[in-house]
């Protein structure tokens, strides 16, 4: 396997994490997040933390740090830039919009239960509700208007499906150009494309906002697990919501809205998309600058909080007595299986590697640093992270001899008959320099 292929797989995983975060604006009541962390195991004496352990870990650490990881991650920063540039396109915005096509909500208001269909009509409605977007996205709104069946009421599953089928045709014909060229224009367009979903969330119908809402209980912990910075607090999110509500000029903050649908149609919700995407985009930019260092620093905290990341991926809404996982729809739109735990997602993403990888040493990685209890974050000690990875590489080399030899030959560009020699030299070095 060539280095580019290995980097491509890693980039796919990182891009998937970014893309699946977009529809989290639709999630509520995750069904309970496991708060049990490997604290007891983590607090046990880690042999790598002793002075002697660190001494014996150094040679193996240098092999992994200076040879193996640069071989795998070399050029990852440039590859990530290609990934993000590829995301900042009108095609991605259209895929995000299409991910809503099969979602129907049963919304209870008083004693009445009504079905809320997520329709292309609502995207067109959102564009035309604001002077600054009406002109900017006029061609998109005009195109979406052509697929509308009936008015704003009386929608059915069949009619909504026909409308989305019409959107498919518009995209194929190149009629939906959002003019996306960069991060700012992408976030704005994505916010409008997700408008059918967001219009149901801005009034807290699906428990997205508030201290017990999805943003507080799933999104913020998930972003922290990834090591994201500049995360918008619940208070700041509520303030952004209040500002957007005041901009509508139809209701005072904290009062009962007389016409929820009318106000929601006029109310912008780009802040909800920005609150989720900006920390992730900042992390990707950090990786572009120092891919290996950023990954090493984030691994212990991610491993320690992997249950939070699993909840982040699997959060959903309780709709009509059943849980609807919005992530699955967006994952399907991008050809990514986002069901299950973090381990399941990574296993699927790395299935294309030419070797069978051993289980990821989550507990060892979670212990590769010091836990700052004030911010509930593991601060990585890089020497320990590299020591754990050295053990893992050694185990991987032992687990699939033929696959590792092929990867060595392809990566180094050497004849296949020399691969076994290189393999056994690597194996001997890892054995002799194994930390403990």
Image (tube, grey):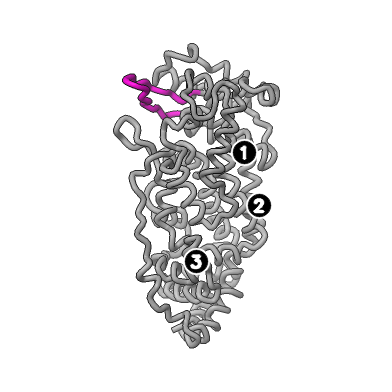
Q: Is residue 167 left or right of residue 157?
A: right
Q: Earlier in the sequence, mark 2 or mark 3?
A: 2
Q: Residue at x 48, y 56 (%)?
A: 225
Q: Identify which residue is drawn at 36% across, 26% down.
A: 106
Give 138 or 220, whichever is nearer the viewer: 220
Q: Quarter of the image containing the C terminus? A: bottom left
Q: Is residue 329 visible?
A: no
Secondary structure beneath disc 3?
Answer: strand
> Which residue is painted at 41% across and 23% down in the image?
116
- Crowd band around label 2 with a 10 angstrom C-alpha radius: few (<14), some (14–19), many (20+): some
Q: Main secondary structure of the magenta part?
A: strand
Please check the rendered image and state whether residue 105 is part of the magenta-colored stretch, yes or no. yes
Q: Quadrant of the N terminus?
A: bottom right
Of badges 1 and 2, the one in the foreground is: 1
Q: Name the residue located 44 percent from the left edge and 53 percent from the top edge.
A: 309
Residue on which the image places disc 3: 372
For label 2, the residue is: 81
Image marks 1 and 2: residues in contact by CB distance under 8 Å: no
Q: Position of residue 406 (x, y in %)?
A: 50, 68
Where in the figure is residue 320, as x and y percent of width and height? 31, 30
Q: Is residue 428 left or right of residue 286?
A: left
Residue count near mark 1 (Cα–Cα under 10 Å), binned few <14, some 14–19, many ≥20: many
Tell me the residue that label 1 is attached to: 187
Q: Are marks 2 and 3 in contact (CB under 8 Å)?
A: no
Q: Is residue 268 located in the magenta-colored stretch of the structure?
A: no
Q: Residue 104: x, y in percent?
A: 40, 27
Looking at the rendered structure, the number of numbered marks drawn on it comes to 3
Report the span colored magenta: 101-119
Residue 211 location, quadrant: top left
Q: Nearer the viewer, residue 373 or 138?
A: 373
Residue sticking out furthest to the top: 150
Real-space CA distance between mark 1 and mark 3, rounded to the nearest whole angstrom: 33 Å
């Amino acid at each position: 396997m060539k280095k580019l292929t290995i980097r491509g797989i890693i980039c796919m995983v990182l891009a998937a994490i970014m893309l699946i975060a977009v529809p989290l604006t639709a999630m509520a009541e995750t069904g309970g997040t496991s708060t049990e962390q490997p604290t007891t195991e983590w607090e046990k004496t880690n042999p790598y933390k002793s002075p002697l352990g660190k001494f014996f870990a150094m040679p193996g650490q240098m092999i992994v740090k200076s040879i193996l990881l640069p071989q795998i991650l070399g050029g990852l920063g440039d590859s990530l830039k290609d990934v993000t540039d590829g995301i900042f396109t009108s095609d991605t915005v259209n895929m995000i919009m299409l991910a809503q096509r099969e979602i129907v909500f049963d919304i209870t208001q008083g004693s009445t239960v009504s079905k809320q269909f997520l329709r292309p009509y609502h995207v067109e409605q959102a564009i035309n509700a604001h002077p600054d977007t009406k002109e900017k996205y006029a061609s998109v709104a005009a195109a979406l208007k052509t697929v509308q069946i009936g008015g704003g009421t009386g929608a059915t599953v069949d009619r909504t499906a026909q409308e989305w089928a019409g959107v498919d045709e518009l995209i194929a014909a190149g009629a939906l150009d959002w003019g996306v060229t960069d991060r700012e224009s992408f976030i704005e367009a994505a916010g409008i494309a997700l408008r059918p979903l967001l219009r149901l969330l801005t009034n807290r119908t699906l428990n997205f906002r508030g201290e017990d809402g999805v943003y507080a209980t799933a999104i913020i912990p998930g972003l922290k697990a990834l090591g994201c910075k500049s995360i918008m607090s619940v208070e700041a999110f509520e303030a952004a919501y209040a500002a957007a509500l005041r901009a509508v000029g139809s209701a005072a903050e904290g009062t009962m809205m007389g016409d929820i649908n009318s106000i929601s149609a006029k109310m912008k919700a780009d802040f909800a998309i920005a609150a989720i995407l900006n920390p992730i985009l900042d992390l990707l930019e950090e990786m572009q600058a120092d891919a290996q260092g950023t990954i090493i620093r984030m691994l212990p905290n991610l491993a320690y909080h992997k249950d939070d990341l699993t909840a982040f991926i699997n959060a959903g809404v309780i709709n009509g007595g059943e849980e609807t996982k919005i992530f699955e729809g967006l994952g399907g739109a991008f050809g990514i299986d986002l069901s299950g735990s973090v381990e399941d997602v990574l296993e699927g993403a790395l299935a294309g590697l030419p070797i069978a990888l051993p289980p990821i040493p989550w507990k060892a990685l979670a212990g590769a640093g010091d836990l700052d209890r004030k911010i509930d974050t593991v601060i990585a000690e890089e020497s320990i992270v590299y020591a754990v990875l050295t053990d893992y590489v050694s185990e991987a080399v032992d687990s699939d001899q033929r696959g590792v030899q092929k990867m060595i030959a392809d990566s180094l560009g050497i004849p296949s008959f020399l691969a076994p020699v290189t393999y056994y030299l690597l194996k001997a070095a890892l054995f002799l320099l194994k930390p403990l």
